[in-house]
Amino acid sequence: MVWLVSGVVFFLPQYLQLSPGATALTAGLELLPWTGTLVVVAPFAGRAVDRFGERWVATLGLALQGLGYLLIAICVHKSYGWLIVPLMLARVGLSMAGPALQKTVLGAVPRSAIGQASGIYNVFRLLGGALGTTVAVMIFYQFQSRDFVRGFQATMWGTGMVSLLGVVWSWRLASNVPRS
């Protein structure tokens, strides 16, 4: 479910540029609560995975990501200030789920296969990014009806719901799988 971020990356800057007086620079700066959170949270998330296990961190991360996207959908007709917390929640969630899911994959194989597992994980992460963009565009297309904001809102609802669906699957992860 982390793959959905690619679809959000596609639409979020466009949405931010729709506000009156927005430029590419202001839209980029308005993305900082979403993009900058990764740099702050990811190192702590890695330690949390080691301490609490993949299942807990991935589940909490996907729940926060889904909640953030749903709150963005709710706040699309409000001023930018209303988006700061939802943007941060969504990215904190992604920053938590990413290390947890990667550790799950790499921890499930013997030490001699970590390189191969890492490569396969990366291929599926990139493929998932393409799929996430495709799903987001399909949702947008079905709901936009000549109104970008309406399509963006539907896309955020969809990505939020799929992220929350990921919570069900993340709870099934085996935490701290011992290596052979």
Image (cartoon, helix red, strand yellow):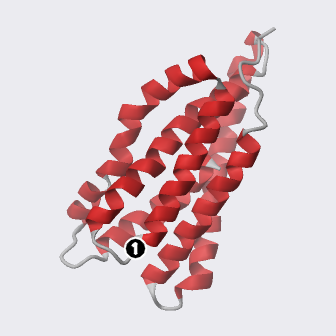
Q: Is 109 left, or right, of 52 in this rendering?
A: right
Picture coordinates of residue 153, whole percent (x, y):
49, 74
Q: Which residue is mark 1?
A: 76
Front residue of this view, candidates 24 and 178: 178
Query: What residue sits 40% from the left and 70% below the top?
Result: 75
Q: Is residue 127 above or below residue 45?
A: below
Picture coordinates of residue 127, whole percent (x, y):
67, 49
Picture coordinates of residue 130, whole percent (x, y):
62, 56
Q: Would residue 38 be seen by someone viewing this image from the given angle?
A: yes
Query: What residue sits 58% from the left and 40% below the top?
Result: 60
Which residue reaches farthest right?
180
Q: Is 25 left, or right, of 82 in this rendering?
A: left
* Quadrant of res 107: top right
Front residue of this view, candidates 137 and 178: 178
Q: Secondary structure at mark 1?
A: loop
Q: Would residue 131 be seen by someone viewing this image from the given angle?
A: no
Picture coordinates of residue 23, whole percent (x, y):
22, 69
Query: What residue sits 36% from the left and 33% below the top?
Result: 40
* Quadrant of res 61: top right
Task: Residue type at mark 1: give it.
Answer: Val
Q: Is residue 159 above or below residue 106?
A: below
Q: Is 177 left, or right, of 30 in this rendering?
A: right
Q: Is residue 33 above or below residue 172?
A: below
Query: What residue sits 31% from the left and 77% below the top?
Result: 18
Which residue reaches farthest top?
180
